[in-house]
Amino acid sequence: MSEHALNAVRTGTESRRRSSWAGAAWRQYRLERRMFWRNPTAAFFGFLLPLLLLAMFGAVFAGEQDQLDVVVPGIAGMSVMSATFVALAYNLTFLRERGILKRLRGTPLPSSAYLAGIAANAIANTVLQVAVVLLAGRLFFGIAWPGDWFALLVFLAAGVICFASLGVALSHGIPNSESAPAYVNAVFLPMIMLAGVFFDDEDAPAVLRDLAEAMPLKHLIDGLSGAMVNGEGLADHGVALLALGLWAAAGIVLAVRGFSWSSRGDG
């Protein structure tokens, strides 16, 4: 067989592999979407809770536009963290400890395609939640459409990568699925309280502001607030974007190095 024919065969084989991988990832993504909406608890905490918080704080701060300008971007940032960090930390711990990840490695489904389907589901939830928060902020709370859509999309992408990788990294340190809520909430709840989700952190004591500055959620909210409320671009929040990038890099390293398909009991 000629060299040209061999290259054609290799190219065709590689193309079929890519198509097969994409099809497997797409099917897993569709399955994850169906499972999400069929789980009332997941749908509530992953989708309805941010909307309920938005409605509640919108009612409390009705007529106080300065406060609404803080709350709407804050809940948008919280939604990003909830749909990625919280969801992936819970789900991967459950799948690992129940032996599902280990069994999947023995099936024809490519492991990377399976993980891609899970990640795509988290991204879809993020996009949906933030879109609803933006729409509600525009229709009910007097928040204008984002003045810089590009900056908004960049910060959303950075937030998704950052918190998704940190969620995977945290799942490595959770000993079992029963303790997952305690571990996840020990990170999630203090972070949303300190990062200024529900209040203007400029009024907080200096020590709390310093703690918030060390956390990625604060920088995500700053970027989202700049794009949504003030029409500010990336140049105005370069430090926030850099901080998210550093957290994302650390999360990716920890997520990859600590990843395990088997539960600790199998070791």
Image (cartoon, rainbow, N blue to C red):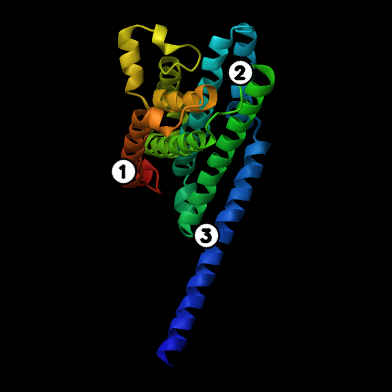
Q: Is residue 52 left or right of residue 263?
A: right
Q: Quadrant of residue 40?
A: top right
The amino acid sitting under disc 3 is: Leu
Q: Nearer the viewer, residue 2 or 35?
A: 2
Q: Is residue 99 visible?
A: yes
* Residues at marks 2 and 3, CA–CA distance in whole angstroms: 40 Å
Label disc, if present, on residue 105 of the rendered structure: none
Label disc, if present, on residue 109 of the rendered structure: 3
Q: Earlier in the sequence, mark 1 or mark 2?
A: 2
Q: Quadrant of residue 68?
A: top right
Residue picked out by circle 1: 253
Q: Position of residue 230 (x, y in %)?
A: 50, 22
Label disc, if present, on residue 54 of the rendered structure: 2
Name the front one of labels 2 and 3.
Answer: 2
- Which residue is pictured at 54% across the width and 41% down the height? 123
- Which residue is pictured at 50% across the width and 28% down the height? 227
* Residues at marks 1 and 3, CA–CA distance in whole angstroms: 25 Å
